[in-house]
Image (spheres, rainbow, N blue to C red):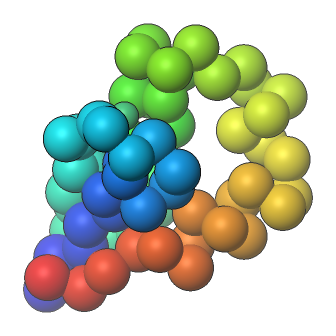
Amino acid sequence: MAYTLACRDAGETTCPFVARGETKEEVLAQAAKHAKEVHRYTDEQLNDPKMMKQMKTIIKQA
Ligand SMILES: [Zn+2]
């Protein structure tokens, strides 16, 4: 079982990035790294409980 998280589902509608991982934690870690590197999100934004909750709701099982 694998999980994916599409950046466009997180609101970056023009971004083709999709994080993939064997666990939700792995997917979230990849998405966070990408968001920091490409979209210049800060740790503060990424650790925001609302953001974390939203990210978890858009994870899909592949
Ligand atoms: Zn992106």
Q: Position of residue 19 (x, y in %)?
A: 26, 50
At 33% from the left edge and 70% from the top edge, which residue is drawn? 23
Q: State which quadrant residue 54 falls in.
A: bottom right
Q: State which quadrant residue 37 falls in.
A: top left
Q: Position of residue 47 (x, y in %)?
A: 78, 42
Q: Residue furthest front?
A: 14
Between 21 and 61, which is closer to the camera in this rendering?
A: 61
Q: Is residue 22 visible?
A: yes
- Tell me if residue 41 comes above or below residue 31 in the rendering: above
Between 35 and 28, which is closer to the camera in this rendering?
A: 35
- Tell me if residue 15 comes above or below residue 55 in the rendering: above
At 47% from the left edge and 74% from the top edge, which residue is drawn? 58
Left or right: 36 in relation to 51? left
Left or right: 41 in relation to 35? right
Q: In what quadrant of the picture does the N terminus appear?
A: bottom left
At 22% from the left edge and 60% from the top edge, which residue is drawn? 21
- Tell me if residue 56 comes above or below residue 48 in the rendering: below
Q: State which quadrant residue 30 falls in.
A: top left
- The total of numbered circles placed on residues is 0
Q: Position of residue 18 (x, y in %)?
A: 22, 50
Q: Quadrant of ligand 1?
A: top left
Left or right: 54 in relation to 20? right
At 25% from the left edge and 66% from the top edge, which residue is drawn? 4
- Tell me if residue 52 comes above or below residue 59 in the rendering: above
Q: Is residue 26 visible?
A: no
